[in-house]
Image: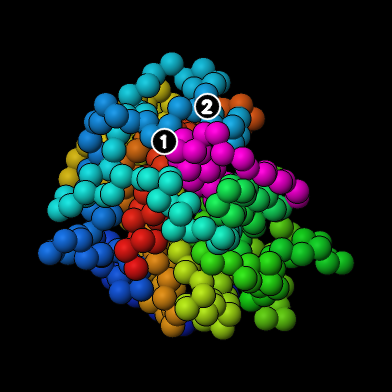
Amino acid sequence: MGFFFQGNLSLFFFFLLCLSTVSAYSNNTSNDNGGERRELGSGRCNWFKGNWVYDAKYPLYDPYKCPFIDPQFNCKKYGRPDSAYLKYRWQPFSCSLPRFNGLYFLRKMRGKKIMFVGDSLSTNMWQSLACLIHSWVPNTRYTLLRQKGLASLTFEEYGVTLMLYRTQFLVDLSSEKVGRVLKLDSIKQGNMWRGMDVLIFTSWHWWTHTDHIQPWDYMEDGNRLYKDMNRLVAYYKGMTTWARWVNANVDPSKTKVFFNGVSPVHYEGKDWGEPMKSCSSQTQPFYGRRYPGGTPMAWVVLNKVMRRLKKPVHWLDITGLSQLRKDAHPSAFSGNHPGNDCSHWCLPGLPDTWNLLFYSTLFST
């Protein structure tokens, strides 16, 4: 799809400016708002720059003993024959991530509410965290409630609640007389996110969908309807609306905010030098100094939005490390996702590392 700027030259120049930040991504420089760099010991460490190493102690939990994994992510249960993909641990170049300790997490977060807000990749991460905690307290009582668009898991002894609010775009999607309208400048559903101790957002996956899997008929910006627009422009507008919501509604003394970055897909093998392949039958990460597929433009857009935030938001910049895991998708081994799934992730698997990064950042700030 070509760029569609609707005559708005400022957006055109914005995307020219975005191109200049690609080199910053390639060099993995830090973002002041993103929380990419943390003080560990006596030196600085970028947790998001490193490589994948084989670790015989992995995975961090047994998929057959975790009661929270949806069929979509339960690759072992649905026949994935190889196991090496379970054994890789993320190793930053200049430090090591803390090992996850579920008891420590529950005790530190006693009585608190943590909400994941986003699409099915938020579900992926929510279930991963639930399994990580459960593996430490397998006999503790819990309450799991599910209803349309909202789920909550409470570890009763500790009063810790992990919530999931499903929304594909963060901005509002509503039914109007003209049809389903994606409102790029409206975020009324944000009222559901108030009162949380921790918010973890994600959004990108659904912005690219077209045709029969596109869940809207029109986009609305201001008082004007559009049948379509360039999806990166739309994403920038939507995420800017989200950033305004954070600036206006979050009290940093009461709520910590995270954004789990752009999760990549692996449908096209040309992205890692195997043009005739996809994620199907991949059994090892990509090894190399730089991922051939380059910087996703969605990352560039998100980077611009993050720089405009006035309130602290910890950007879990998982894009680069996730690009290397062409082996970690369900592909054909999914219980309710027909075809070749190269966008979600097996559990146990990559989202456990996302949660280790969340865990490390949460308790170091």
- SS label for mark 1: loop
Residue 22 vs 270, above or below: the answer is below
Q: Earlier in the sequence, mark 1 or mark 2?
A: 2
Q: Residue at x 56, y 60 (%)?
A: 111
* Residues marked 1 and 2 touching at CB (< 8 Å): no
Q: Nearer the viewer, mark 1 or mark 2?
A: 2
Left or right of residue 223: residue 268? left
Question: Residue 21's spot in the image, x, y percent?
Answer: 29, 69
Instruction: Note whether residue 303 is visible.
Output: yes
Distance between mark 1 and mark 2 Cα atoms = 15 Å
The part of the chain drawn in magenta is 121-148
Tag on residue 67?
none
Which residue is labeled 1 in the image? 349
Question: Residue 222's spot in the image, x, y percent?
Answer: 67, 81
Which residue is labeled 2 in the image? 65
Q: Nearer the viewer, residue 139 or 328?
A: 139
Query: How many residues crowd around disc 1 within 10 Å: few (fewer than 14), some, or many (20 or more)?
Result: many
- SS label for mark 2: loop
Question: Residue 121's spot in the image, x, y percent?
Answer: 53, 47
Looking at numbered disc 2 in the image, what kind of residue is underneath it? Lys
Query: Where, quadrant-wise, is the C terminus in this rendering?
Result: bottom left
- Residue 75 lies in the magenta stretch: no
Identify the residue at the far left of this view. Answer: 42
Looking at numbered disc 1 in the image, what kind of residue is underneath it? Gly
Q: Residue at x 59, y 55 (%)?
A: 159
